[in-house]
Image (spheres, rainbow, N blue to C red):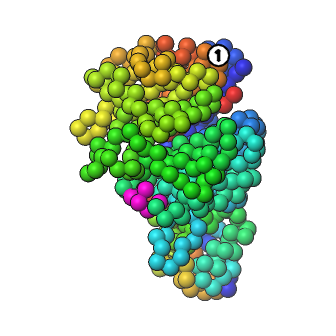
Amino acid sequence: MAGTLWIGTRKGLFALRADGARRNWKLAGPQFLGQIIHHVVQDPREPRVLLLATRTGHLGPTVFRSTDRGRSWHEAARPPAFRAGHDGEEARAVQRVFWLTPGHRSERASWYAGSSPAGLFRSTDGGEHWDPVAGFNDHPMRPKWAALGTPDGEFLHSILVDPRDPRHLHIAISVGGVFESTDAGRNWTPLNDGCAADFLPDPSVPFGHDPHCMVQHPARPERLYQQNHCGIYRLDGPGRRWKRIGDAMPKTVGDIGFPIVLHPTDPDTAWVVPMDGQSVWPRTSVGGKPAVYGTRDGGASWRRMDRGLPRSQAWFTVLRQAMCADTRERPGVYFGTTGGEVWASTNSGDSWRCLARHLPEIYSVSHAA
Amino acid sequence: MSCTVRIASPLRSYTAGAATLAARGSTLAEVLANLEQRCPGIRFRMIDEHNRIRPHMRLFVNTGEAHELSATVRDGDTVHVICALSGG
């Protein structure tokens, strides 16, 4: 089974294609040269289909769709956009489509998109036409939930559709927190108990947290993991309190980072890439010595996995969409760096090798079977 | 009213590569609506969902910058679509 890594960068889209053994990789592209690619996602329900979220420095945000595994792309007829506001209302405009998530397997043409400023959108025709999810975008609490955005606006990401129930959704907002809906997005409830928010005047607030990336295990959907601005967390439903599993990370490394990736079949196995979150938040690899950390016991313990990675003076960052795993029994794990390198491990993190260098700043890495 | 629209290079994927198009309309809004009919998708890349010109876009009618879509366009005018971007 060959696979493709789709590499979304600040200056275009690239693809790394593997042979069946994942030994030889060939770089293709760029497509969309000069365009900012925030996310590229394969449709697991229809693997020929990919969706891509893009904008350029000049032009507004949009979505493209491919039905031939990325050979050609067609722009959405109606990209995600907020509804026209009433008089006196804040007139929010989508600045970037930041996140894409395929809908439930029972809803074959459904997709979700997250934006900055924080907005949730849904398509029911494969990504051709998008509508705002009014239950979130117009929720009376939304201005308070997403009140502390950066000048770039708050980012809505990590849209999770429960494989057991298409009406059960989770979203995350940086900055805003995690929110849950059990009625297909009509109503939303904050889900942040147990998470630290030590940057806020009142760290005990029910929302206003900064989840960087949240994932749900397909084989155990009641379990969520979260890499937060303030640590690594796990939540085991039906409980509603996050447990800081990052406490088991080495104190000299800390538990700050952007991505968190799960093993495709083992809900106890996950990988993170710690970054420096001290003082002025350099957000680089800690000490210039990049490492992936992996857990095989749900975060009770973590193991440093840096064989093959640079030993020193490597100051890159791995952004939240820029790490993924493939679906092999012993999965490959992949990440892209802000310095334009793509690194791969075909033995679940035990050793690493660089597949590509000199690409533009990498925003997303996703695996397509 | 008939005018000429000069298209900046980032938008020419919508105009089959054309740098100049003829369009009809007596305001910028009408000219852009006319353009959108023939080049679907082009308007939203320039104008947001609240009819505001996007931050890195500049629209000129002849040599005067237009800040609102209600700006008047007269017969024979030239509308310039310009992209303003800094940094690498």
Q: Nearer the viewer, residue A110 or A321?
A: A110
In the current view of this chain or complex, which residue is farthest to the left? Answer: A279
Against A72, residue A15 (above or below) is above
| Chain of the residue under label 1 | A
Q: Nearer the viewer, residue A295 or A45?
A: A295
Residue for badge 1: A329
Query: Does residue B7 show up magenta in the picture?
Result: no
Q: Secondary structure at mark 1?
A: loop
Q: Nearer the viewer, residue A40 or A113?
A: A113
Q: Residue at x 53, y 35 (%)?
A: A237
Secondary structure of the magenta portion, mostly?
helix
Q: Position of residue A304 (x, y in %)?
A: 40, 16
In what quadrant of the picture does the N terminus of chain A appear?
top right
Against A260, residue A151 (above or below) is below
Q: Position of residue A215 (x, y in %)?
A: 53, 35
Q: Which residues are magenta?
A: A142-147
Q: Nearer the viewer, residue A278 or B57?
A: A278
Say if residue A356 shows up in the picture.
no
